Amino acid sequence: MTDKPTETIAAELTLDPAIDCWDFSGIAQPARTDDSAIEQEIQAKGKTAPRIMSAGFVANIVSEHYFRASDGVNGETGGTVDLDWTHPLGRLTVCVLVLRNGVTVTGECACASPENFDAEIGRKIARQNAVNKVMGYALKAQLHATAGEG
């Protein structure tokens, strides 16, 4: 996973009060700046290896579904347990993306502090985590397919 010392990883896992959301896909990366600025930097540095561009990927999303983990508990128990946003499961937002080829991918966002819970922000972060997850897989699949052609 990582070769960083445990102390370094723990230091990187502190919550940003403005977002108040844990990233389950690994150690959170620094916040990205404007996409066009990043693309310019990539081009300026001559990074020309195959990449997956998010705009092309996003066009393949045919539907998006959002729910909180508490919704699942409520459904599983037949409605006998109703957990609101004050419960940790009420602050765990899940995004399910359905792609044109039938593949589904999930992203999650868990808000640690009830005071900072915002459903809209949670959905946005969960969606971005789902997109990031599948884009890495898509690039590996593309590279594997290209290597097999030679």
Image (cartoon, rainbow, N blue to C red):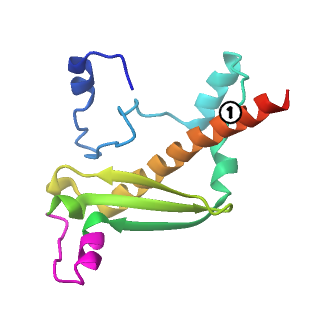
Q: Position of residue 53 (x, y in %)?
A: 67, 41
Residue 52 on image: x %, y %: 67, 39
Q: Which residues are magenta?
A: 71-86
Say which residue appears at 39% left-offset and 40% top-offset. Answer: 25
Please tell me which residue is depicted at 51% across the width and 43% down the height of the picture. 132
Q: Residues within 10 Å of mark 1 (few under 14, many from 20)?
A: some
Picture residue at 56% right of the left edge, 46% below the top: 134
Q: Is residue 121 above or below residue 38?
A: below
| Closer-to-camera residue (130/145) | 145
Whether 72 is drawn above or below 30: the answer is below
Q: Quadrant of the N terminus?
A: top left
Residue for point 25% across, 32% down: 13
Q: Amino acid at mark 1?
A: Arg
Is residue 72 shown left or right of residue 136? left
Instruction: Specify the principal SS of the magenta part.
Output: loop
- Does the magenta-highlighted stretch encompass residue 82? yes
Pointer 1 residue: 51
147 vs 131, nearest the viewer: 147
Location of residue 34 with respect to 89 vertically, above or below: above
Q: Is residue 99 left or right of residue 148?
A: left
Which quadrant of the structure image shows residue 99?
A: bottom right
